[in-house]
Every structure is written in C-alpha cells, then in structure tokens.
Amino acid sequence: MVRTKQSKRNRRSRALVCACAGVLAVTGCASGQRSRSLDQPDISKRPSGLEKTALRERALEMLNGFSFDENPLLRANAIEAMQVVPSRAEPVAAAGLGDKNPGVRYSAAMTIGTLQLRGIAPQVKALLRDKDARVRCAAIYALARCGETVNRSPLAGYLLGRDMRVSSTAAFVLGELGEPSAIVLLRDVARPPRQRDPAEAKKAPPVGRPDSVERVIRRLQVAEALVKLGEDSARDVVRSALYPRQREDFEAAVLAAQILGELQDTTAVAQLVQLVEQTVPGASKGKGEGTQYIQPKELRLAASTALAKLGYRDGVYVADAYRDDQAPAVRAQAAFLYRASGRWGDLETLTEMMDDPSPLVAVSAAAGVLAIMER
C-alpha cells in the first residue's frame, strides 16, 4: 500500500509499515513517572556547533544518495525524510516526479504538497494522467496545497471505487486537504457494505468472517479523515483496531497506533501503554530480555512511537530492546521511535545505526538524526 506522510507524520509513514487512564495521568508510561512533553527543554548533552554541522551534513548527504538508490523503497523514504529541510527536499522531490516507481512518484508529489513547494508545483500536473490512481490522488493534493487550479472531483470516484488501496489513499488525501464537502461521502463509505452498495456487498465476506486487511485499513483511513474534518466520534473506530484478534489484524493495529499518534489522541494513552507493557500471564514483569510480552515487537514499537508523539517518551526503552534485532525492518522501526522521541541523548545511538549493514535501517537512522537536529 502506498502510504506516506512525514509531517505532522512520515506516517503513515506511514513506506517503512492499561485500562486505568486516571492512574496514567499520574504515573505515566513505562518508568513510573510521566515523561517530559516534547516542547519542554531537553537537557541531554548536545553536540558542539562543529559536530552538529558535520553530522547534519552527513545525514543529508546520505539521504540524498538514498533518494537515487536502485531500491524504490529507499528512494521514497529518503525523499520523505528530507522534508525537514525543504531546500534540500525540493530537488529530490522534483526528480522523484519522473521516477519509474509509482510509490516514489507518490512520495515526491506528497512532499511537494506538504511543503507547498510552489516553484515546482506545475511539474506535478503531468501526474494527473498517471497510470496509477494513487499517484493521481497525490498530484491533486500537491496542486491544491500549492494553490494551483485543479479538479478535486476525481477523489470522490476513487474513494467510492472498489480498489481498497486507492480508496484508502483518496480518504487520506481528503482528510489532509480538510475538504468539508467530503464528510458525507466518507460517512457513506464508513457504513457496512451491506448497507450502502449491493455490488460491494456481494464481495464482502460472509457475516461472522473478518474483513480483509485492505478493507480494515480503508476503514481506518476513512475514520482518520473524518476526525480531521471534525467528526470526533470516528476516533472510536481507530481505537477499536488496536487489539488484533488474528495474525492478519496486526498490520491494521500498527496503522491504528500510528494514526492515534498523529491525531494527538491523548484519550488512547492507556490503551497504547497496555499494548507496550502487557506481559504473558505468569511471566516476569521486568523489562529485561527474558520478559515475554503479549504483543509482537512491531506493534509494541508502533504503540511506543505513538506515545512519544503524545509526549510520553519513557517508552524509548522499547527501541533500546530492539535496536539490534535480527530483522532490518524492526531495527528501522526502532530508529523511527528514537526519532519520534526527539531526544538529543539518542543522537549517538542513531549515528551508530547510520552504519547499519541494512540500507533500510541506515535511511531511517539518518532521518532520525536530521529530524532531531532540525527540531
């Protein structure tokens, strides 16, 4: 699924994919004390001026190189990561518009829209005829954000279409554009298939059988868009997806956690902490290597990242636990948690991770270094 946002999110980024709230308000997450909010000063040791300049330039050069890598995932991630330095993001985004991979074209167009790079916005118009519908959605977003005249009506067709991935992208774009006229359409799409479209109802799973991952993800994207447009009740849809009932639900649960962090949904703190800390019944309650947690590492990392975005940074210990994991995708996710925590004290760790043998981890670590230094 093409899903990227660095903002506000790299959300959804989106290229990489305790029940007592009252107690949490006092004790916070993980360590027993509430973490400092991200807007409070970080007294951790910071690099000197020369060290900072050298490290910043190294991260930028690394990301610039990855934006032209043979791996399209690395190209897309690098373009998004450079959004924190618009002057350096502009040329790579412009180049990405002509990339052979639709995911990279999508990331380039979304970057231009997010940063409102008006100077190169006219170049996006060619993507309105792109063969990939998700890229066309991103082109509409970029042109609208940059003040260019563009017909937004195709987004409604994409939203109502039967391709769940395209529909999800259209929902995301409508939410990002703050398009109030889309509320009625989004509400309609949010209804169960059997209540809205006989043709779609025929493709829906029988009663009692879980929806496909693509359909659940579309439901979450629609709910997120509705929240952005003022429909707070849609938050319940996102929160309910945090508890996977089967293996296929984990991808949606990770996305739900990411969305809650982006929406700054502080009412979900207790649920997120539970995902991070809940251990197997009878297992030890410590945070050591032998601790057995109920949720998989990917979901624990996503929940900790959401908590960091909400101002609870104590969960960074989860990144410490998985930074040397055998799976590159998990190590990359750990780097993203360090980035979300935004602590100067984690720069040394991220700098080491820039030398990881996996390019996926290196690009995530470089993105984290740059984000912290540009904060």
Image (tube, rainbow, N blue to C red):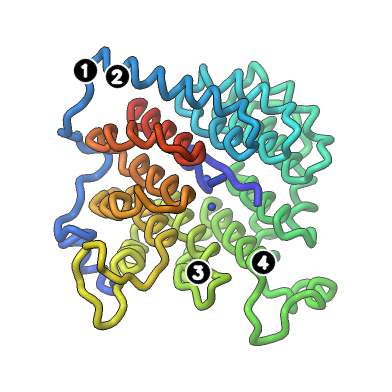
Marks 4 and 1, the one that precedes in the sequence: 1
Q: Is residue 215 above or below residue 183?
A: below
Question: What residue would you read off at disc 4?
Answer: 215
- Residue 65: x, y in percent? 55, 23
Q: Nearer the viewer, mark 3 or mark 2?
A: 2
Q: What kind of residue is marked 4?
A: Arg
State yes or no: discs 4 and 2 in contact (Cβ < 8 Å).
Answer: no
State yes or no: discs 2 and 1 in contact (Cβ < 8 Å).
Answer: yes
Kindly indicate the quadrant of the structure image that contains residue 278: bottom left
Q: Nearer the viewer, residue 221 or 354?
A: 354
State yes or no: discs 4 and 1 in contact (Cβ < 8 Å).
Answer: no
Figure quadrant of the C terminus: top left
Mark 1 lies on a secondary structure that is: loop
In the picture as drawn, the residue positioned furthest to the bottom comes out as: 208
**Tag 3: Cα neighbours inside 10 Å, few (<14), some, or many (≥20)?**
many
Question: What residue would you read off at disc 3?
Answer: 241
Mark 3 lies on a secondary structure that is: loop
Q: Is residue 322 above or below residue 338?
A: below
Whole-angstrom CA distance, mark 4 to mark 3, is 12 Å
State yes or no: discs 3 and 2 in contact (Cβ < 8 Å).
Answer: no
Q: Residue at x 75, y 76 (%)?
A: 204
Q: Residue at x 36, y 31 (%)?
A: 369
Q: Residue at x 45, y 28 (%)?
A: 84
Q: Is residue 193 above or below residue 361?
A: below
Mark 4 lies on a secondary structure that is: helix
Residue 48 numbered mark, or none: 1
Q: What kind of residue is marked 3?
A: Ala
Can residue 182 be seen in the rendering of this structure? yes
**Tag 4: Cα neighbours inside 10 Å, few (<14), some, or many (≥20)?**
some
Mark 2 lies on a secondary structure that is: helix
Q: Nearer the viewer, mark 4 or mark 2?
A: 2
